[in-house]
Image: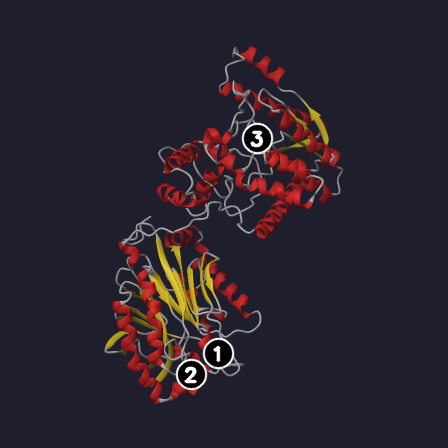
C-alpha cells in the first residue's frame, strides 16, 4: 500500500531531550543542534523535543521579562539554521514561548529546512500543586489570531493544525497537560486524520509517575489508533523542589516501541503508518464521537521527508508475533488462554447438559492441549475426569513414542482411556473401494482421518458425549485437516490458538504440574507429524513441516495478513528481516504454499465448528473472516 510517495509505509520517528539551561535560550538552541544532527544522520522523518525547550520550563517569572523574551527572539534563528543545515528533510518540533495578541503562549513550533511550518499553543494550563502556568501563559482557547510571525516568517497558529508530508506523515501536537485531561486535543486531531500525535512535555517526576505516564502514552496510541511521540524535559530542569527525568517515549498501536529515562538522549523507532491506516479502516469506531466536522482542521504541507525518497524498512522484526518474548509474560499469557479455552468448553458442557467428552489422543501437541483444557474444565465444574473418554487410535504411521505418550498422559490425568486400532477398518475400506493398500496417496491418508472421526462421533453417541476437536488455528489457516475428518467436531477448543503458541501452553501446564512435566516435555520434543504414512526405507517419519514448511513462517504470514492486512509482498519482505537465518528462497517457497492454501481452503473454514476466540486473529466465518468459499488469484 502506497502512502503518498512512501512505498513501504514505514517512517522513522525520534524523540530527544538534552541538559536544559533554564533562562538561557542561546545555550539551549546550541544544545539542541546535536540532537537535530543525529536525527538528520539517521534519516528521521520527525523529531520531537521538549516543552519550552528554548527557555527551560523552570524559567519561572523570567518568562515575564523582556530580557528572556528578547533572548528567545535572538536564539530562534540559530534553531531554524540547525533545521536547515543539519536535518533539512526532518520535521522538527520544539517548545518555545510565543507572543501573540498581547498574550504569551506556551507553544510547539513545527519547522523544516529552516522554515516555520506551524505553531500550536498549549490548550490546558495546569495551575495546581507545583504548577503555576496560568501565571505566565494564556490558554489556546483565548487566542484570537490564526497566524503568527517569527523570525520574519508567518505561519498558521492554533490547535486546529495537522502538518502533513508525502511520506504519509500527518502530525498533530499536544503539550504536556493536554495528554492528562479527559478529552485530549490529540483525540480530535486523530479523528481528523492525524496519524502521529507529538507531545512536547515538561513532566516532573514523583514516585510512580513514570509508570503512569508510560500507560497514558501507550493507551493514547491505542485509543486513537496512532503513533504517539513524547519528549519530556531532562535533568537540567531539576531545581528547587522538583526533579525532571527526561522521559522519552514512542508508542504505536498500544505498544511502547522505544523509551529512555534519566539521561539526555535521542531515541528513534521505525513506525508503520500503513498498519495505522489499515487499522483505522477496519476499526472505524476509533474516529467516532470526537465531534470533528469538515473544515475543523487546517492542513499544513511540509516538504517530503526521508521516507518519501528512500524505501525504509525496520532493522528488526519480531519473528514470533503470537508469542510474548518475556518468559514471565509468556507464562501469564498462556495461563490466560488456558482459562479462556476451559471457560468456553465449560459453558458448552453446561448449556447442552452433556456430561461426557470424547477426544482422540494421538500423543501430539494439539490433542495434548485439548485434553489438558478438558481436564481443567472438568476440574472447574467439579466433575469426575473419568467422564473424559480419551481414545488412542493407532494407524499405519503411528510411532511407539507418540502411542506411549498418549497412554502416559491419559493415565496421569485420570481420564478413561481406550485404544481402537483403525488399520483393520481402513484395510476393509480400501478393499471396498478398490484402493491398493500400499498406495500411499491422499486416499490412504484421509481414510484414516475420517475413520478416526467416525469412531469419535459414534462413541460420543453411545456415551451421550461431545466430541472435542483438536485442530489449531494454523492448521485451519492452511486447511491442513481432512474435510469431515479431523476438521469436524462438536467444539473446536484449539481453533483460536496458533501452532507456535501451542507448545508454550503445554509447557506452562508442565511448569505448574510437576507430575506431568516429563510427559509433556516428551510430547513437546516430538516432531510434528500427522503419522498417516509408514516410515520410509531409512526409518524417517512423515514430517508436516518438511512438507509445508515451518509453522513459524506460516504463523508470521497469518498474523500480518489477518491482524495488519498487509499485502503479500510486504509480508514476505518483513519475513526476510524477521528470519535472517532462513534463505530468502525458502521464505518465498513457504509464502507460496501459505497464500495458495489460505484462500483455496476457505471452504473448510466456512463449515468449521464453534470454538473460542482467543486473540486478535481468528478465522471463524461467523466472526472475523467473512470470505467466499471459492477464491482465485488473491495476493
Q: Could you tell me which secondary element the residue under label 2 belongs to?
A: helix
**Which residue is at 51% across, 46% downward?**
322
Quadrant for residue 369, please give it: top right
Q: Is residue 404 visible?
A: yes
First in sequence, mark 2 or 3: give its number.
2
Look at the picture and state if 190 lies above or below 125. Answer: above
Q: Is residue 161 visible?
A: no
Q: Alpha-carbon distance for marks 1 and 2?
A: 11 Å
Residue 430 percent location from the top left of the image: 55, 13
* Label 2 crowd (10 A; few <14 / some 14-19 / many >=20): some
Residue 618 percent location from the top left of the image: 51, 43
In this figure, which residue is indicated by the disc labeled 1? Answer: 238
In this figure, which residue is indicated by the disc labeled 2? Answer: 59
Q: Could you tell me which secondary element the residue under label 1 belongs to?
A: loop
Left or right: residue 537 compared with residue 332: left
Q: Can you name the residue that lies furthest to the left here? A: 152
* Label 1 crowd (10 A; few <14 / some 14-19 / many >=20): some
63 or 449, nearer to the observer:
63
Amino acid at each position: 500500500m502506497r502512502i503518498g510517495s512512501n512505498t513501504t509505509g514505514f517512517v522513522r520517528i525520534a524523540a530527544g531531550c538534552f541538559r536544559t539551561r533554564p533562562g538561557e535560550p542561546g545555550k539551549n538552541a546550541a544544545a539542541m543542534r546535536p540532537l537535530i544532527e543525529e536525527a538528520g544522520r539517521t534519516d528521521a522523518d520527525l523529531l520531537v523535543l521538549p516543552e519550552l525547550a528554548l527557555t527551560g520550563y523552570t524559567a519561572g517569572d523570567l518568562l515575564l521579562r523582556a530580557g528572556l523574551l528578547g533572548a528567545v527572539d535572538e536564539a530562534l534563528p540559530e534553531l531554524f539554521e540547525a533545521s536547515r543545515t543539519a536535518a533539512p528533510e526532518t520535521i522538527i518540533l520544539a517548545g518555545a514561548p510565543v507572543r501573540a495578541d498581547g498574550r504569551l503562549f506556551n507553544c510547539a513550533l513545527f519547522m523544516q529546512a529552516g522554515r516555520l511550518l506551524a505553531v500550536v499553543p498549549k490548550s490546558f494550563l495546569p495551575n495546581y500543586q507545583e504548577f503555576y502556568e496560568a501565571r505566565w501563559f494564556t490558554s489556546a482557547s483565548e487566542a484570537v489570531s490564526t497566524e503568527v510571525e517569527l523570525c520574519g516568517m508567518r505561519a498558521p497558529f492554533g490547535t486546529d493544525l495537522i502538518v502533513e508530508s508525502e511520506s504519509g506523515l500527518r502530525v498533530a501536537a499536544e503539550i504536556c497537560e493536554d495528554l492528562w485531561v479527559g478529552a485530549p486535543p490529540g483525540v480530535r486531531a486523530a479523528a481528523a486524520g492525524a496519524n502521529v500525535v507529538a507531545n512536547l512535555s515538561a513532566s516532573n517526576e514523583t514516585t510512580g509517575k513514570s509508570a503512569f505516564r508510560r500507560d497514558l502514552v501507550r493507551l493514547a496510541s491505542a485509543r486513537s489508533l496512532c503513533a504517539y511521540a513524547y519528549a519530556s524535559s531532562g535533568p537540567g530542569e531539576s531545581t528547587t523542589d522538583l526533579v525532571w527525568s527526561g522521559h522519552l517515549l514512542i508508542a504505536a498501536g498500544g505498544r511502547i516501541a522505544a523509551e529512555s529515562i534519566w539521561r539526555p538522549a535521542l531515541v528513534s523507532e521505525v513506525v508503520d503508518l500503513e498498519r495505522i491506516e489499515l487499522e483505522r479502516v477496519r476499526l472505524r469506531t476509533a474516529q467516532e464521537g470526537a465531534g470533528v466536522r469538515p473544515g475543523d482542521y487546517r492542513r499544513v504541507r511540509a516538504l517530503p521527508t526521508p521516507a518519501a525518497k528512500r524505501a525504509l524498512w525496520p532493522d528488526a522484526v519480531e519473528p514470533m508475533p503470537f508469542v510474548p518474548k518475556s518468559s514471565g509474560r509468556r507464562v501469564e499469557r498462556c495461563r490466560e488462554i488456558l482459562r479462556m479455552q476451559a471457560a468456553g468448553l465449560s459453558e458448552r458442557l453446561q448449556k447442552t447438559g452433556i456430561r461426557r467428552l470424547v477426544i482422540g489422543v494421538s500423543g501430539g501437541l494439539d490433542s495434548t492441549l485439548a485434553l489438558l483444557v478438558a481436564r481443567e474444565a472438568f476440574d472447574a465444574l467439579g466433575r469426575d475426569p473419568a467422564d473424559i473418554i480419551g481414545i488412542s487410535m493407532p494407524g499405519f504411521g503411528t510411532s511407539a513414542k507418540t502411542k506411549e505418550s498418549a497412554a502416559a498422559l491419559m493415565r496421569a490425568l485420570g481420564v478413561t482411556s481406550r485404544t481402537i486400532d483403525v488399520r483393520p477398518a481402513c484395510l476393509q475400506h480400501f478393499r471396498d473401494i478398490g484402493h491398493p493398500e500400499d498406495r500411499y496417496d491422499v486416499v490412504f491418508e484421509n481414510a484414516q482421518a475420517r475413520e478416526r472421526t467416525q469412531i469419535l462421533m459414534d462413541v460420543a453417541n453411545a456415551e451421550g458425549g461431545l466430541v472435542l476437536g483438536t485442530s489449531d488455528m494454523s492448521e485451519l489457516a492452511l486447511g491442513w485437516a481432512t474435510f469431515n475428518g479431523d476438521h469436524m467436531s462438536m467444539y473446536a477448543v484449539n481453533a483460536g490458538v496458533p501452532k507456535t503458541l501451542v507448545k508454550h501452553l503445554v509447557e506452562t501446564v508442565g511448569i505448574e504440574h510437576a507430575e506431568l512435566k516429563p510427559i509433556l516435555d516428551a510430547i513437546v520434543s516430538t516432531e510434528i507429524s500427522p503419522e498417516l504414512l509408514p516410515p520410509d526405507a531409512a526409518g524417517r517419519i512423515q514430517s508436516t513441516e518438511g512438507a509445508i514448511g515451518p509453522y513459524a513462517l506460516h504463523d508470521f504470514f497469518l498474523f500480518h495478513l489477518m491482524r495488519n492486512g498487509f499485502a503479500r509482498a510486504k509480508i514476505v519482505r518483513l519475513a526476510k528481516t524477521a528470519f535472517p537465518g532462513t534463505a530468502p528462497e525458502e521464505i518465498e517457497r513457504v509464502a507460496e504454499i501459505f497464500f495458495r492454501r489460505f484462500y483455496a481452503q476457505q471452504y473448510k473454514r466456512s463449515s468449521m465448528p464453534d470454538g473460542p476466540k482467543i486473540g486478535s486473529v481468528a478465522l471463524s466465518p461467523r466472526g472475523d473472516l467473512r470470505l467466499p468459499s471459492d477464491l482465485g488469484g488473491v495476493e
